[in-house]
Image (tube, rainbow, N blue to C red):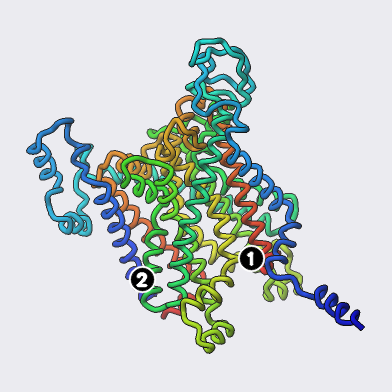
Amino acid sequence: MSDAPRAEATVALAAEPAGPWRLAWRRLRRNRAALFALGVLTILTVIALGAPLWAPYDYARQFQGAERVPPGWSGEVRDAANGDMRASRHWLGTDDNGRDTLSRIVYGARVSLLVGILATLVSLVLGVAVGLVAGFHGGWLDAALMRVTDTVYAFPSVLLAVAITAVFDRPSLWVVFLALGLVGWTGIARLVRSQVLTVKTLDYITAARAMGAGSARILVRHVLPNCLGPIVVAGTLALGGNILGEAGLSFLGLGVQEPYPSWGGMLANARQNYQYYWWLAVFPGAAIVITVLAFNLFGDGLRDALDPRARR
Amino acid sequence: MATFIFRRLLQAVPVVLGIVLICFVLLKASGDPTHMLVRQGASAEERLMVRERLGLNKPWYSQLGRYLMLDLGRSYRQERPVLDIVLDGAAVTARLALGAMIVAVALGLLSGIFSAYRPHSPIDYACAAGASIGISVPAFFLAMLLILIFSVKLQWLPLPAPEAGKLAYLVIPVLTLGMLSTALIARLTRGCLLEEMTQDYVRTGRAKGLQDLKALTGHAFPNALVPITTVIGNNLAGLLTGAVLTETACALPGLGRMIFEAISQRDHPVIMGGCLFFALIFVAVNLGVDILYALLDPRIRYGHE
């Protein structure tokens, strides 16, 4: 007698439909490129977090007599501290100052990921706020906000970021992510606005309003969750874009300052001599490409998983 | 059509004003440029003279008003009118941008059509991989890579140079600058074509014996052109961003490089002139795209009249 309700419950459990996020995860798991990218991103995060553990040497340490040595070089160098001869090995060679390229790339991962994530957060907050308000309120506010968005969008992003960094006296990590974040929100604002415009005509919004929910509550509890998929996708793709942007600003000399390494800064240093010593440019450049590619592939995978209609 | 163009022009005005305003505010926020222009330990009188000569003693609205009258003034650093400097830089960048656009449209459309002709074939996957890498490579790194491979190792192409009568000098910068747009156009073309191919009119055509390639190029392609045109127009801001990095990596004295240098030297008139010039170009190109758009899609034209 007590068995009957339990059996019923089991059936109900088995038949419970999977939520949209679970379905998306199932689709994502079948996408080999996206999974591979996720793996690469996990490894990158581990590298960045534990940089002192993985880097063979300190990022600022200069090996005298081992300047611009090729990848895989090993030999004896004089220790700058006490003048002893020491054996050293440089898997990816050294730069103009005799600093180990591998160590600098490992530490540089910290800058890239940190700036990428923080800049994306700034863009997301700004873009979501502008998009939600413009789309939901409509009318003059929508028109005004969209004109502002158009204007910022029309700017070449690097120049605007350069101008913002010029306002501050000294370039630093904080200035860079703020500048990138303040430049990058326009795409997200447009996306959120268009999502809101479709969502707000749906019946359940009318129902919520009929039940007496205020605008703020409807926006946050009903409209926002239904725009979340595209926002997550845009955020992931923006991460890759912001890492590219950080590399670009660093390449122009506006990023994190020496001796702390950033991948773009390493390429800027390489500009003098890379034609004779290829490894100065190739390894930091490859690090940028791999990281950005991983974010883009994962973002594409997420889009396919979250929006089945976009699938072929 | 005339009303349509007029409306578009009106909408462009706030964007141009906005760009000028943002530039102006940022410049004012970055402080007084005089201290970078006078020698160390200059007297207060000297500073005042410099400020007077540069017009910095005037109230802010008259300084801003001058730009709105399209009076660009003279550079703080170089004894030349800003207009000359801007036009010199624009001549270099225009060549790069034009070349990049041609490369991007040709390669992007071709690769998109190939991919859509045989989706999920090895060619399609190769194009998709190429496009993914294309949007992930920083322009400056690509330029260095191309120089390493084609100028240094294989010696097929000369190093990029500013005074270049020959096209060979521009091949690397143009490819670098065009890469991102190529990748974007290729992706979009493939997507749009595949979507059009599922439409009823294509199915009808096929049922009547239309060949795959003909259905693709003759029927789906013209309809896919509308979104593709928009993206090409939207790419312009990205193109100038790319120009700063490409010109830096290839040591070319273009508009992007020039504005960047002006920003780091606090040469305010050149920055304002460069931004104003760019804003006008941007608006003009977008207007051109909109008109093209209306020509391609009669619905847009009639919807507005």
Of all chains, the one bearing label 2 is A
Nearest to viewer (mark 1 / mark 2): 2
Residue B51, located in which quarter of the rendered image?
Answer: top left
Q: Which quarter of the rendering shows the C terminus of chain B?
A: bottom left
- Binning the other alpha carbons within 10 Å of mark 1 as few (below 14), some (14 to 19) or many (20 upward) gives few
User: Which residue, given by chain and number where applicable, does mark 2 sit on?
Assistant: A144
> Which residue is situated farthest in the left direction here?
B45
Residue B63 picture location, percent across and down? 17, 54
Q: Residue at x 46, y 59 (%)?
A: A185
Figure check: A260 above or below B200: above
Q: Chain of mark 1?
A: B
Residue flagged by tag 1: what amino acid is it? Gly
User: Which quadrant, please, contains the N terminus of chain B?
Assistant: bottom left
Residue A174, position in %: x, y? 42, 46
Which residue is at the front of the view, A29 or B209?
A: A29
Query: Which secondary structure, mark 2?
Result: helix
Residue, disc 1: B218
- Gap between marks 1 and 2, in whole Å? 41 Å
**Label 1 SS:** helix
- The three-letter code of the residue at mark 2 reads Ala
